[in-house]
């Protein structure tokens, strides 16, 4: 695995670039064909390599997907003995959202965001109807993060949302009032961002996470 | 892979628990032996399964190690065309450290931390000698996070440090003055934590990251 990774590095290959054939890799790396094949399969599991049947191997996307799958499984296992993982995830998202108060409100000051306001309205409408709005919620936070130009943070938060999504059905449902409060908190977050007000933003973020943490902690 | 994951879930297995033999898995899941073997190898790459030669397969630690390896490779590849990944990592750590200001200073108010002060002193001494102190730096931040009881955050930060460590040698070196300032910032962070002062903590965190970001951004 290390030899193939080192090959990718030495040749400065990028995602989507073609890798040599198995036999060429054997010759180049001085290892057996079965070792190359097993290494490629393991690297495939990590999304470092993509194998297309009949076409060969390519450098993969190196996405967070493998992490997500592992976290989802761990969260599901923990579910049997509690909701520790979800608690960790929500606290981590809370910390990240608070921690970006300055750069985010700076980047968003004076912007207008009709698409994000539509999402806020949709959340409020669904909350009044007693429905949940996880998709809108995810799209909203992703829309804010897009202002930061930090791919890692974006991927981490997306990974945490996927775990969140997979665990949420097993949780006690939020009340209609809590859903409406959370929808309002999103409006307050967006208002603070557009006004460039980090203190108001931090207060709205705290208001956003408080009911969620209460539900996870079993109230 | 999904069938084996589902087996782990259905039986509520924990890290270190033994999995059935390959032939028992074939029978239980109704798939071929070669499919079971390949799935186990891929799950091994994800640290969901551990295979001990001659002893069988066990449920793995589901650690962040696979993520770390992928991030390290991606960071190293980006290094060829810039230091985007390291920049993302340092900004993400900065955001997390700021975001935990309240719970961390609350948890640490009134505590005494001789081991962390020793690390601060070691950093200051090494800075005066013109040496670096990455190990002490990592141990210091890990010691703070230990107060939070959030395994995910701990693992994420550890993963980011490993990438950081692998990329740092390729960066322009910090000046002796910058290393001394950064050592002082660690003392200020610890002082603020023990005093339970979130505002002083946030200011010290900003002072800690400013020189690092300057170096990464090429000053």
Image (cartoon, coloured by chain):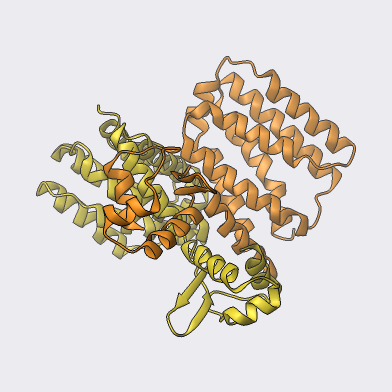
Chain colours: A yellow, B orange
Position of B159 relative to A31 (above/below): above
Q: Visible in this render: residue A154?
A: no
Point out the image quarter for the N terminus of chain A: bottom right
Q: Which residue lies most toward the bottom here? A: A55
Identify which residue is drawn at 38% across, 64% down: B35
The foreground one among A42 and A156 is A42
Q: Give coordinates of residue A54: x percent, y percent.
A: 44, 84
Give the quadrant of the C terminus of chain A.
top left
Q: In this view, does A26 lie above or below A109?
A: below
Quadrant position of residue B23: bottom left
Residue A115 appears in view: yes
Look at 52% across and 54% down and name the residue there.
B67
Q: In this view, does A96 lie to the left or right of B216?
A: left
Q: Which residue is drawn at 52% across and 70% down?
A: A49
Residue lying farthest left? A129
Spot occupied by residue B205 in the image (x, y as percentages of width and height): 62, 38
Side (left or right) of A57 relative to B20: right
Q: Quadrant of residue A24?
A: bottom right
Taking depth in this image into account, of B173 and A188 the one nearest to the observer is: B173
What is the count of numbered marks? 0
Q: Nearer the viewer, residue B97 or B47?
A: B47
Can you give x and y, in whole percent of width and height, for residue B72 in the image?
A: 62, 57
Q: Position of residue B120 (x, y in %)?
A: 74, 29
- Which residue is nearer to you in this view: A116 or A138? A138
């Amino acid at each position: 695995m290390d030899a193939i990774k080192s090959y990718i590095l030495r040749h400065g290959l990028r995602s989507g670039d073609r890798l040599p054939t198995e036999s060429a890799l054997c010759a180049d790396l001085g290892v057996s064909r079965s070792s190359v094949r097993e290494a490629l399969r393991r690297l495939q599991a990590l999304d470092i390599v993509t194998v297309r049947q009949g076409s060969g191997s390519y450098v993969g996307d190196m996405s967070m997907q493998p992490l997500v799958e592992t976290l989802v499984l761990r969260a599901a296992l923990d579910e049997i003995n509690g909701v520790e993982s979800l608690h960790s995830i929500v606290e981590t998202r809370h910390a990240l959202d608070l921690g970006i108060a300055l750069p985010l409100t700076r980047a968003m000051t004076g912007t207008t965001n009709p698409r994000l306001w539509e999402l806020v309205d949709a959340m409020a409408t669904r909350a009044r109807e007693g429905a949940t709005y996880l998709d809108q919620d995810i799209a909203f936070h992703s829309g804010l993060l897009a202002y930061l130009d930090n791919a890692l943070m974006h991927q981490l938060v997306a990974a945490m949302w996927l775990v969140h999504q997979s665990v949420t059905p097993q949780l006690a449902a939020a009340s209609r009032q809590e859903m409406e409060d959370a929808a309002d908190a999103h409006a307050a977050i967006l208002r603070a961002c557009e006004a460039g007000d980090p203190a108001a933003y931090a207060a709205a973020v705290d208001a956003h996470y408080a009911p969620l943490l209460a539900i996870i902690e079993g109230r």
